[in-house]
Image (spheres, rainbow, N blue to C red):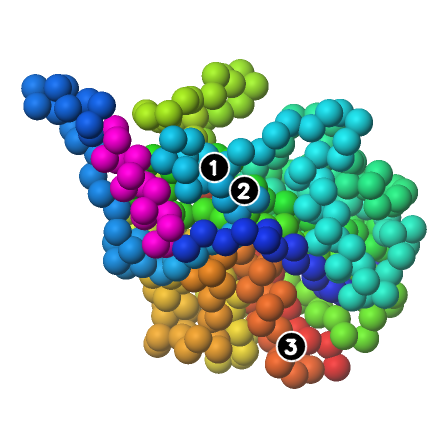
């Protein structure tokens, strides 16, 4: 049985960034316009006025300072308040596949791997562009990879679920080299007219190459163990789909865009994830001090701080639990992979770390790794 490892990672970042100041300016302009248009209803108290947002509110609630987006013009336009992403003809590569390919090529290059060396492609993401054909198969075709490919969606935990799935293929002998991509255009499902969530998400694409240890490059990461968990909850939900595809327009986007009960999520997910991490530490015969670094899901700075504190028994240092949330915002499945990609070069051989995700479902995944000697 082959031992699975992480050979390399890749990251594609959109060229456009939106600061909190820009986002607040557009939201408040939209809010003022809406309130003026509904002044009579507001005066009659049949509707509530739309509140104003602020930079201070966003940073206190989330720790986010800016985010990258696939389209900036529509997001910051008070008359549009959503990204403008033109549909492409079927003969042209889809936008989700395109950004996945960019991240994938970086991972393949880092591992010194030719696409022909890869046996399978997994596209693991929250926000799939379509039901079929699978995004993974389109990525496979664009890269010239043989073998097989398929999509999987476990919301913000899609990447860790994808890593375990790829690792299982390697362990079973079904594949020796598996490319797992996480293209996330989260801005497309975000309600930019909702004060409580208009700042949460950003766009990005990441890639992880999981391979058998015997063919991996020297600078790889041993996968010590993986663990997955799901628990049904309506506290994070998006009802848009082919059975109810009437896309909401303007005000009152309701449940066809991202909605959540943030306080309930915080209260329920933090202890669940902390217990899960501790249980896996116990199973692997490790203790919290053995972790040189924790690359946690980049959803909320306060959640990460509390989860890390529960695991370590104290507050984590920025080095122990690095953040990319401040500049990338929540990028769903890609968040922990971005953190891992950008904050691993200083890890010495033999040192261990944790890639961890958690999100809608609820879903949670842990991947314990060790830098190869």
* Label annotation for residue 178: none
**Residue behind mark 1:** 74
3D distance between C-alphas at marks 1 and 2: 7 Å
Residue 114 position by quadrant: bottom right
Asked whether disc 1 touches disc 2, contact meaning CB atoms under 8 Å apart, the reply is: yes
Instruction: Depth check: give the residue in front, 366 or 132.
Output: 132
Label 3: few (<14), some or many (≥20) within 10 Å? few
**Residue behind mark 3:** 345
In the image, residue 85 above or below residue 351: above
The answer to which of marks 3 and 2 sits earlier in the sequence is 2
The structure residue drawn at horizontal position 62% and vertical position 73%, both measured from the top left corner, is 344
The structure residue drawn at horizontal position 54% and vertical position 42%, both measured from the top left corner, is 71
The answer to which of marks 1 and 3 sits earlier in the sequence is 1
The residue range painted magenta reads 20-34
**Residue behind mark 2:** 71
Asked whether disc 1 touches disc 3, contact meaning CB atoms under 8 Å apart, the reply is: no
3D distance between C-alphas at marks 3 and 2: 31 Å
């Amino acid at each position: 049985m082959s031992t699975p490892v992480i050979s390399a990672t890749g990251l594609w970042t959109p060229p456009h960034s939106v600061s909190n100041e820009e986002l607040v300016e557009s939201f408040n302009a939209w809010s003022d316009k809406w309130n003026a248009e509904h002044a009579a209803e507001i005066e009659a108290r049949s509707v509530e006025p739309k509140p104003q947002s602020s930079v201070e509110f966003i940073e206190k609630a989330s720790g986010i300072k800016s985010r990258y987006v696939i389209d900036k013009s529509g997001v910051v336009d008070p008359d549009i308040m959503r990204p403008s992403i033109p549909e492409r003809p079927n003969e042209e590569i889809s936008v989700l596949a395109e950004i996945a390919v960019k991240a994938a090529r970086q991972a393949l290059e880092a591992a010194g791997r030719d696409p022909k060396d890869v046996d399978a492609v997994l596209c693991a993401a929250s926000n799939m562009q379509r039901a079929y054909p699978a995004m993974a198969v389109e990525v496979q075709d664009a890269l010239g990879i043989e073998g097989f490919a398929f999509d999987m969606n476990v919301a913000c935990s899609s990447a860790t679920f994808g890593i375990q799935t790829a690792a299982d293929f390697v362990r079973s002998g079904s594949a020796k080299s598996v490319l797992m991509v996480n293209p996330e255009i989260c801005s497309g499902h975000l309600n930019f007219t909702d004060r409580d969530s208009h700042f949460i998400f950003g766009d990005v694409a990441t890639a992880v190459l999981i391979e058998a240890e015997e063919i991996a490059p020297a600078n790889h990461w041993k996968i010590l163990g993986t663990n997955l968990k799901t628990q049904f909850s309506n506290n994070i939900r998006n009802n848009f789909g082919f059975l109810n595809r009437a896309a909401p327009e303007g005000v009152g986007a309701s449940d066809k865009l991202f909605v959540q009960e943030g306080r309930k999520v915080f209260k329920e997910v933090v202890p669940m994830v902390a217990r899960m991490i501790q249980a896996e530490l116990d199973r692997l015969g490790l203790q919290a001090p053995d972790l040189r670094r924790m690359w946690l899901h980049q959803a909320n700075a306060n959640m990460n701080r509390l989860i890390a504190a529960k695991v370590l028994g104290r507050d984590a240092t920025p080095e122990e639990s690095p953040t990319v949330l401040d500049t990338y915002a929540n990028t769903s499945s890609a968040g922990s992979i971005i953190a891992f990609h950008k904050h691993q070069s200083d890890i010495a051989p033999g040192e261990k770390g944790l890639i961890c995700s958690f999100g809608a479902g609820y879903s949670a995944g842990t991947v314990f790794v060790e830098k190869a000697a």
